[in-house]
Amino acid sequence: MAEQNRRKLLDLLKLPGNDKCADCVRTDPEWASYNIGVFLCKECAGLHRTLGSHISKVRSIHLDNWEDSQIVNLEAVGNANARLKYEAHVPPSYRRPSPEDVTVIKEQWIRAKYEREEFIHPDRQVYELGTMEGWLNKRGKEDGRFYPRRFVLKEGEACLKYYVKESHKEPKATIHVSELNAVFCPDKIGNKHGLHLSYVKDGSTRNLFVYSEDGKTIVDWYNAMRSVKLHHLQVAFPGAKESELVQHLTRDFLKEGWLWKSGPRPTDQHRRRWFTLDDRKFMYLEDPLDAYPKGEIFLGYHGEGYTVRPGALPGFKEQPFSFTVVTPTRKFVLASEAEKDRSEWISLLSKVM
């Protein structure tokens, strides 16, 4: 009986929609929530377990034995039908998770769908109200410690502000949403709910690092920023398609990591710098959590004189994994700490160019 039921499950996995995780769309799911009626990847199955068995009952397709009664709902529902119910009213600006996304995005998507049922009941979507106010822990620019700061987001003003104290009338900073980007960077910030905010200030990129102890809070802030930005873009570009505007709400960094960077002269020594590839901005910092980069390299197109190639320039010290970024005004000699890392940098930089 158990083997017969397992064959039924494997046949169900072949149906359209069931071949990918119901929550993060990772291929070849090997788990299932039999009371909800969906197939899941291993990571999302683990997140379902944190909901409690009163919400989601999870079993392994290959490791557990299945009873007839447990398969009935999977046959009746399946991933495609479950999406029609649990994702009926997902806002266009809401960040749907992919397999590569950080855990907090996946976790809160799953809780929003099945625990809070936010996409069945749109009135529960606090990130769609056009305003948000509350406290986030922000890293201090001078001492590197995190302090609670009051943040205020208002769609009518199209800006995000933060205040040092509740009693302060004037904000410490006012950030227009058109300049604002937000990226989850838990490992860099040292908190599983860490969020990296960046914007342009006086011609340079300004970095803010924040976190909340509560996963829902930080993801609500993230999606509220995306929602306000979408509405701002819809006003600014009334003829643009919504699907096109959604691509410009937030952008993840293409890559970050340590590189060795030489100065402009062959005799200059290499210094270890943290590099961030943010679309066409290639920034380097002394510390990953610096408020401002030491330098920003704009990356144009190959036809404009921009290129990247393996190896150092003639006369420069050849590091084991060197490569050179060429711009019309300067050549930057860099070095990775491994061949795989160098290949990734060269590939991504070349694609941008």
Image (cartoon, helix red, strand yellow):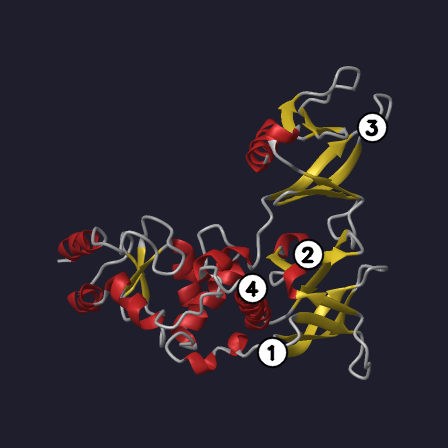
Q: Nearer the viewer, residue 323 or 47?
A: 323
Q: Which residue is mark 4?
A: 233
Q: Secondary structure at mark 4?
A: helix
Marks 3/1: CA–CA distance: 47 Å
Q: Which residue is mark 3?
A: 264
What residue do we see at 66% from left, 41% from top? 257
Pointer 1 local density, CA inside 10 Å: few below 14, some 14–19, many at least 20:
many
Marks 1/4: CA–CA distance: 16 Å
Q: Secondary structure at mark 2?
A: helix
Marks 2/4: CA–CA distance: 30 Å
Q: Which residue is mark 2?
A: 189
**Does 37 appear above or below 273?**
below
Q: Left of 343 or right of it: where is 179?
A: right
Asked which quadrant contains residue 137, the reply is bottom right
What residue do we see at 73% from left, 56% from top? 200
Asked which quadrant contains residue 77, the reply is bottom left
Mark 3 or mark 4, whichever is nearer to me: 4
Mark toward the start of the polypeptide (3 vs 4)? 4
Mark 3 or mark 2, whichever is nearer to me: 3
Q: Secondary structure at mark 3?
A: loop
Residue 269 in sight from this viewpoint: yes
Which quadrant does the N terminus fall into?
bottom left
- Whether label 3 touches label 2, CB < 8 Å: no
**Does 183 appear above or below 163?**
above
Pointer 2 local density, CA inside 10 Å: few below 14, some 14–19, many at least 20:
some
Mark 1 or mark 4, whichever is nearer to me: 4
Mark 2 or mark 4, whichever is nearer to me: 4
